Image (cartoon, rainbow, N blue to C red):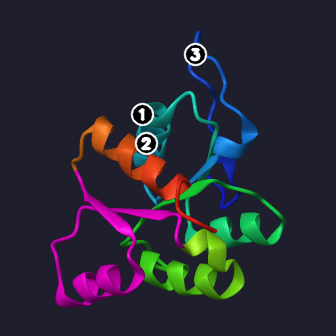
Amino acid sequence: MSETDDPLRPLPGRPSAPEEARVLIIDDERDVGVAIGRILKPAPVVFAQSAAGALGRLDAGGRFAAIICDICMPGIDGMQFYEEVAERFPSLARRIVYVTGSVDSPELSDFLKRTGCACLRKPFEGRELREAVARAMAAPE
């Protein structure tokens, strides 16, 4: 698969949601991104397999109500992605929800405290993800 972003297809028989509810999913493992997208349906989702691809989408004017981002990725990791978003798109930085399968580290704990971003540990329940995304979407701009 290329570095380009792929919109995920809606599930059959599920209504679509308004464009303002669109969610950007960033995960280097495509299957994880697809699974997250299915959990969030009917919200419109866009998938990027890298933080660089996601930043390209944002730079091109992509508008998102929330971002779900893996912490551990090759190239730009989730924490570096946050720093880029906070500098270039500050109102969106408060709307990032992290997911990770990594063990907790002091660096990650400090990062999450400093940023206030939610972080879900894999595996997580669909309800937990939907609630975290709803809170992120409600964050003040």
- 78 in relation to 97, above or below: below
Residue 104 horizontal/vertical position (percent): 16, 76
Q: How crowded is mark 3: few (under 14 residues within 10 Å), some or many (20 or more)?
A: few
Q: Which amino acid does label 2 sit on?
A: Ile
Q: Which amino acid does label 3 sit on?
A: Arg
Q: Distance between the residues labelled 2 and 1?
A: 5 Å
Instruction: Please say whether residue 48 is visible from this viewpoint.
Output: no
Q: Which residue is drawn at 45% across and 50% down?
A: 133
Q: How far apart are marks 3 and 1 (CA)?
A: 12 Å
Q: How far apart are marks 2 and 3 (CA)?
A: 16 Å
**Residue 14 disc label:** 3
- How many marks do you count on the picture? 3
**Residue 49 disc label:** none
Q: How crowded is mark 2: few (under 14 residues within 10 Å), some or many (20 or more)?
A: many
* Magenta segment boundaries in residue numbering: 94-122
Question: Dot 3 lies on which element?
Answer: loop
Q: Give the mark nearest the N terminus, 2 or 3.
A: 3
Q: Look at the image and tell me in which quarter the C terminus lies.
A: bottom right
Residue 122 horizontal/vertical position (percent): 24, 53
| Residue at the disc numbered 2 | 36
Question: Dot 1 lies on which element?
Answer: helix
